[in-house]
Image (tube, helix red, strand yellow):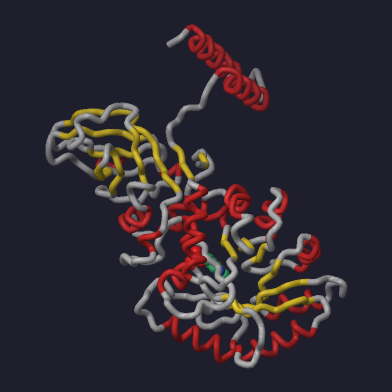
Amino acid sequence: MSLNSNNRLLHRNSTFILYTCGLISSQYHSQIFLNLYSANTQVNRPTRASISLPAILSNLRLARSLTPHSPTIAVVKSDAYGHGAVRVAVYLDDHTDAFGTTSLKEALALRSAGVMKPILLLEGFFSPSEIPLIVEHQLWSTVHCEEQMKPLAETPTNSRLRVFLKLDSGMHRLGIAPENYVSAYKYLSSLPQIEQVMLMSHFACADELDNPMTAHQLQLFEETIRGIEAPTSLANSPFILGWPVPSGDIIRPGLMLYGASPFQELHPNTAQLEAVMSFSTEVIAIREIPSGTSVGYGNNWSAERPSRIGTIALGYGDGYPRHAPSGTPVFIHGRQIPIVGRVSMDLVTVDLTELPNTKIGTEVEVFGQNLSINEVASWCGTIPHTLMTGLTSRVPRHYV
Ligand SMILES: Cc1ncc(COP(=O)(O)O)c(C=O)c1O
């Protein structure tokens, strides 16, 4: 340990004593730490998420090649599925026709970053007070219920709004009932504030390729809109990747942009997706344990042979699922090896017995280029969406 780091420790300890004795305020305490760290220290916890923006673009191009005549709304809601909405949208701005976000707040963050393409609010507005900002920033709003229509009629008549009228074609979550859809369309189209009404619905089961629900929803949509001349928007990632039927006029890919498959089974189109996020860390401790020794909280895993156990710097505090069972793979030195014992907040233990050459500092990929996020999600009984969006704010994102 260098003299410099000894001094830092000394300073830190004396500051801590003053703080615990109540002699300095917590604000002053944080300021001291901030100065200390920014001046002298690199924060070196090895846990990180590497995000390949070119891979997102390649996945967007795949979506476009599968639906060559359809403009694209790139869905970047929920911080671009955990990948950083501003970084992703700024990168894709020249390559997509529009973006999709959940809320006005998410859309305004993109506008503040200079994103100029149209942005569709996938749930519309939550309160009429949001409408002036929607008009000012030229956002597109979904209209999914009758209650959203009256406030639109009450906005100044010089507003020029473009809306996506959502049909409830069977998901029974959002959308206008089929029997009310045409009258809702006619009403909105008659308003001077509405420049254009697009026709939209969302699939409940498109990720199950043998589920008849998708064909049923498509048929209901087509029957309901018969006679209306307006652009349509239906297709999410599973529909774009797995359903070789016309996909409506405007596609709305989300998950596939981030390199994950929406399907449980292999599919030739998903084989073309490029992994986007690599979530990785390093081995920070290694111990040899005799057969019968337990590891981790709750002692719920015991070695069945003399074992070499590595501890890696990542846990549920970073978004790795606490319920990941023993056996869930991580990727080290070119092969998959299992995690063992319970996942803690900051640490996970892995069985390195088959990898005698691993050392402290050995790189561990938890999912990414070498170990698919779909495989890890499947071990954890979840879907890739929850792993991506579950990464916590303490995980630094590096863009490559
Ligand atoms: C209305 C709507 N369109 C498109 C998407 C994108 O779906 P996916 O991530 O399956 O491509 C979503 C996401 O759930 C959505 O809610």
Judged left or right of residue 58, residue 35 is: right
Placement of 44 over or under 74, stated as above or below:
above
Taking the spot 71% from the left edge, 50% from the top edge, the residue there is 114
- Asked whether residue 102 appears in the rendered view, the answer is no
**Quadrant showing the N terminus:** top left
| Residue at point 37%, 47% (across, down) | 369
Residue 63 located left or right of residue 366: right
Q: Is residue 157 left or right of residue 47?
A: right
**Residue 142: image location, x then y, percent:** 66, 72
Q: Quadrant of residue 136?
A: bottom right
Spot occupied by residue 22 in the image (x, y as percentages of width and height): 63, 21
Q: Is residue 103 left or right of residue 57?
A: right
The x, y position of residue 85, in whole percent, is: 59, 52
94 or 45: nearer the viewer = 94
Residue nearest the observer in this picture, 33 or 384: 384
Question: What residue appears at the point 50 percent right and 88 percent down from the top-left corner?
Answer: 219
What x and y, as percent, mark residue 210?
34, 79
Residue depicted at 36% across the width and 44% down the height: 366
Residue 136 shows in this picture: yes
Query: Which quadrant of the figure has residue 175?
Result: bottom right
